[in-house]
Image (cartoon, grey):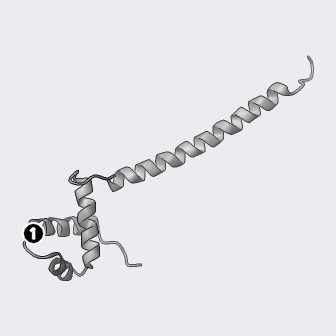
Amino acid sequence: MPKPHPREFRDDVVAVARKGEASIAQLAKDFGISESCLRNWLQAADVADGLRPGTPAAESVELRELKRRNRLLEQENEVLRRAAAYLSQANLPGK
């Protein structure tokens, strides 16, 4: 898999493409990327700028991390709940 292009490069290419002075095919050829890559960058930029419906990449990453953290906390909570139930049923010495 090729190394990802730097964010600044992608932003510059999207800015040039949005000016509409050349076709997508020509711009992709000029910048040495594929047409599908340029189309994906344009679509992602439109979502990030609120021009298209969707979840921006930064929010997707944050949401994924929050879901992972939530799963972990639910597992920890379940362990504590089971431990409390077990200890409440145990016959403690001295009583």
The kind of secondary structure element at disc 1 is: loop
- State the count of labels: 1
Residue 47, given in percent of the width and then of the height, sits at 26, 55
In this rendering, the answer to whether 11 lies above or below 91 is below
In this rendering, the answer to whether 29 lies above or below 45 is below
Quadrant location, the C terminus: top right
Compare residues 56 and 69 and report the one nearer the observer: 56
Q: Residue at x 36, y 50 (%)?
A: 59
Q: Amino acid at mark 1?
A: Gly
Q: Residue at x 23, y 50 (%)?
A: 50
Residue 78, given in percent of the width and then of the height, sits at 67, 38
In the picture, residue 57 is in which quadrant? Answer: bottom left
Q: Residue at x 9, y 69 (%)?
A: 20
Q: Residue furthest right?
A: 94
Residue 74, given in percent of the width and then of the height, sits at 61, 40
Q: Residue furthest left?
A: 21
In the picture, residue 26 is in which quadrant? Answer: bottom left
In this rendering, the answer to whether 17 lies above or below 62 is below
Q: Residue at x 28, y 75 (%)?
A: 36
In the picture, residue 21 is in which quadrant? Answer: bottom left
Q: Residue furthest front?
A: 53
The residue that mark 1 highlights is: 20
